[in-house]
Image (tube, rainbow, N blue to C red):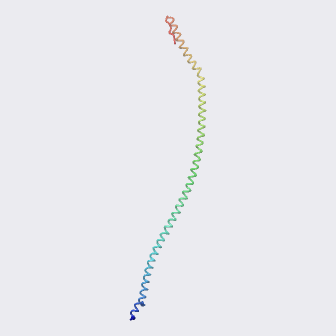
């Protein structure tokens, strides 16, 4: 037999106006809770975004500072490189000049040595007669002494020794 439903049973299947407003309120409360949670997350994201913007700005300032320092270093390197090139060119020039002067000094020294030898030879040639005269005088004195001894021995009657 078919069962007939009572009006109270029908009402339990269909939400009443009071029940519907309670459900909407619950949904609204849930949505508001989600909204406040999302707003909190949004505030956190805004704060994080602000922090990241500050970090990015700080990084940009650091990059600009490093770029200025790098430009100054490049300029300084260029100046030092030019100075080094000039110093190397000057050192090369001085080395050539030093070599030329050393060659000139060697030539002058060899010429001076030749002049000194010529002077010594002239002096030696000029002194030879003096030396011969001195030696001749010494020999003459020795011969005279020897002859005087021979004469003395011959008067005494000794035989003179023969020089060898």
Image quarter where the N terminus lies is: bottom left
Closer to us: 27 or 149: 27
Q: Is residue 70 above or below residue 13?
A: above
- Image height of 141 relative to 65, above or below: above
Residue 138 or 40: which is nearer the viewer?
40
The residue nearer to you, when weighing 19 against 48, is: 19
Percent coordinates x, y for residue 77 in the rendering: 55, 54
Q: Which of the 4 image quarters holds residue 44?
A: bottom left
Q: Position of residue 21 (x, y in %)?
A: 43, 88
In this view of the protein, which residue sits in the foreground, 126 or 159?
159
**Is 162 displayed left or right of 2 in the figure?**
right
Indicate the position of residue 47 as horizontal and vertical percent values.
46, 72
Circle count: 0
Residue 151 location (% of width, % of height): 52, 7
Residue 121 vertical position relative to residue 82 in the rendered view, above or below: above
Task: Farthest residue to the front: give it.
Answer: 1
Relative horizontal placement of residue 135, taking residue 22 as reference (left or right): right
């Amino acid at each position: 037999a078919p069962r007939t439903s009572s009006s109270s049973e029908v009402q339990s299947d269909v939400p009443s106006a009071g029940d519907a407003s309670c459900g909407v309120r619950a949904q609204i409360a849930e949505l508001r809770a989600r909204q406040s949670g999302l707003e909190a997350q949004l505030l956190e994201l805004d704060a994080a975004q602000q922090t990241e913007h500050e970090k990015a700005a700080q990084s940009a300032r650091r990059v600009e500072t490093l770029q200025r320092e790098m430009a100054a270093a490049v300029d300084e390197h260029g100046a030092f490189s030019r100075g080094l090139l000039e110093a190397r060119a000057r050192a090369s020039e001085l080395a050539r000049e030093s070599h030329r002067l050393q060659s000139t000094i060697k030539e002058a020294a060899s010429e001076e040595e030749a002049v000194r030898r010529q002077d010594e030879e002239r002096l030696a040639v000029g002194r030879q007669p003096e030396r011969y005269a001195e030696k001749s005088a010494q020999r003459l004195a020795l011969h005279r002494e020897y002859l005087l001894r021979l004469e003395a021995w011959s008067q005494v009657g000794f035989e003179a020794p023969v020089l060898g």
